[in-house]
Amino acid sequence: MTTVATTRNPGSLRALYSGNALAVVSRALQATRSSNWVVVVSGFFEPVFYLLAMGWGLGSFIGDVTLESGETVPYAAYIAPALLAVSAMNGAIYDSTWNVFFKMHFGKLYDAMLATSIGPLDVALGEIVYALLRGGVYAVGFMSVMQVLGLNLSWTAVLAIPAVLLVAFGFASVGMAVTSYMKTFQQMDWITFALLPMFLFSATFYPLSVYAEPIQWVIKALPLWHAVELVRGLTTGVLGPVMLVHVGYFLVMITAGVLATTTRLRALFLS
């Protein structure tokens, strides 16, 4: 490979992006096929087990749930879209955090990549696209399970797949930006510490109305709540203008995440 990093102007567009993001994706796919495929496959089953245990097991005692729109749906159909959003989040977060952390600090993979014609924006987009692919595979698989179990209540459920990809893109872009600041394993645990309460309290298993209003506003500021509401609206057929707010939230998240990741990689490896 040609080493050109020493001749590039760190502030030029050419130094940021060379159009080789697919090379980063290709390398990640080859690594997954050779050594990491068990971890990828196992990630699909976690939300399925939650759905079977909570939706069908506990759900048989709970019965139906009334949505904010006034419609009533079975409990399994209520939590299934939330678990779909969580599945996309987890898949994207794993690859954009722990995977990136090891490549950055132990494999020194980005040092090698950025010593070639590949720029920091290529690396950011390549890693994010790979995380997106993983989130997409989880989404299609989980949607198939929902269809078999009769939990897709409207034809608009098919739109949940691109919606989940949008969600995965948002989490992957921000996840990689946050990881670029992490230096130790202990710091990486902070990510899990942030994700777990978001998973439990973002209207995943019960309506947001059980909380006091100030707490509701805090939860509504979290990305997973927007993801859950977006996907749940599509699978249940309860749509409205607020769906555009959820989409806009993730578009802003993606833009901020990609810009922050590119800036950090340039500062870390090209300055």
Image (cartoon, rainbow, N blue to C red):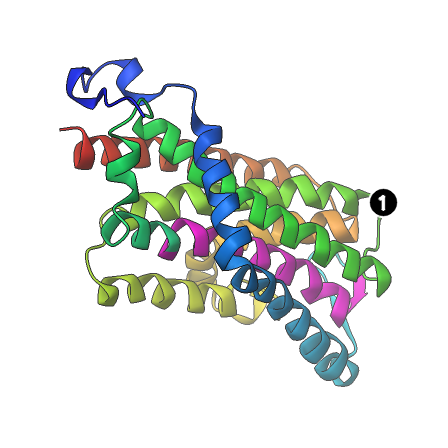
Tell me the residue at 43%/68% (across/down): 197
Depth order, front residue of 258/23:
23
Q: Is residue 85 magenta?
A: yes
Specify start and end residues of the magenta stretch as a single range: 72-98
**Residue 131 visible in the displayed image:** no
Tell me the residue at 52%/63% (across/down): 39
The amino acid beneath tag 1 is: Trp
Q: Is residue 270 left or right of residue 214?
A: left
> Which SS class for mark 1?
helix
Q: Quadrant of residue 93?
A: bottom left
- Point out the image quarter for the C terminus: top left
Q: Position of residue 230 (x, y in %)?
A: 63, 47
Q: Is residue 209 left or right of residue 146?
A: left
Give the overall secondary structure of the magenta segment.
helix
Q: Quadrant of residue 122?
A: top left
Tell me the residue at 58%/43% (across/down): 133
Per the image, the residue denoted by label 1 is 155
Identify the residue at the far front of this view: 1
Q: Is residue 136 magenta?
A: no
Examine the rendered structure and indicate whether residue 186 appears above or below residue 54: above
Q: Position of residue 43 (x, y in %)?
A: 57, 64
